[in-house]
Image (tube, helix red, strand yellow):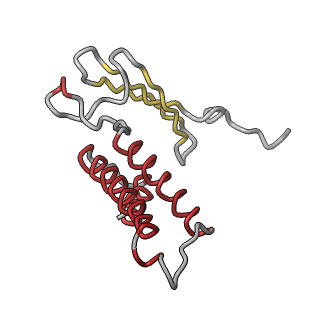
Amino acid sequence: MIGLSMIFIAFQCCIQYSPVALKLMGALMVAGGICQAATFTIFQSDLCSDPYECKFYLGAGICIAAVITALITGILTTCLPRAVEPFASDNGGRAREPFEPGTVTETETIMPDGTTKITRTTVNQDGSKTIEETVYDAPGADEQFDDDV
């Protein structure tokens, strides 16, 4: 259970999970931590009596560290907020505009023939966009070069 949840959590950097999936992963981590902690009941069983002696060695210490880590990770995973709200609820389910109304963006592009194209995009108050394109000649394109100089 813990391993499967850790694989899903590792893919969280590439995949945006729903809140329900995150809570399920957290619950799996907590359940796995509880099951792993239950392995300590073997110290109280008949297996640890003669001829076997059960002692607290390195493996048991690592198991305790794994239980604590799984429980903390599970609890924190269930508390994770959504990274990004993909849709705005106030605009009918459409994706949000990256810029607020009134924003003006200018992009300058140098064309292969040496001219410069400036695109000015204005986001209007109603959410529509006004796009103005202006093309300028390359500097010095109108000048004639004199070979006699």
Query: Is 137 displayed left or right of 46 in the figure?
Result: right
In this picture, is 143 found above or below 35?
above
Farthest bottom residue in view:
51
- Residue found at x 44% / y 52%: 13
Q: Position of residue 37 (x, y in %)?
A: 42, 60
Depth check: 122 or 79 in front? 79
Give percent across and percent down for residue 133.
Answer: 40, 29
27 to the left or right of 104? left
Question: Which residue is at 44% across, 64% downward?
Answer: 40
Displayed quadrant of residue 56 = bottom right
- Which sits in the foreground, 89 or 127? 89
Tell me where residue 44 sits by quadrant. Answer: bottom left
Q: Nearer the viewer, residue 121 or 148?
A: 121
Q: Position of residue 35 (x, y in %)?
A: 35, 62
Asked which quadrant contains residue 131, the reply is top left
Residue at image point 64% right, 32% down: 139
Most extreme residue toward the front is 50
Residue depicted at x 39% and y 62%:
2
Camera-side residue of 29 and 49: 49
Q: Residue furthest right?
A: 149
Percent position of residue 138, x then y: 59, 35
Quarter of the picture holding the N terminus: bottom left
Q: Quadrant of the C terminus?
A: top right
Badge count? 0
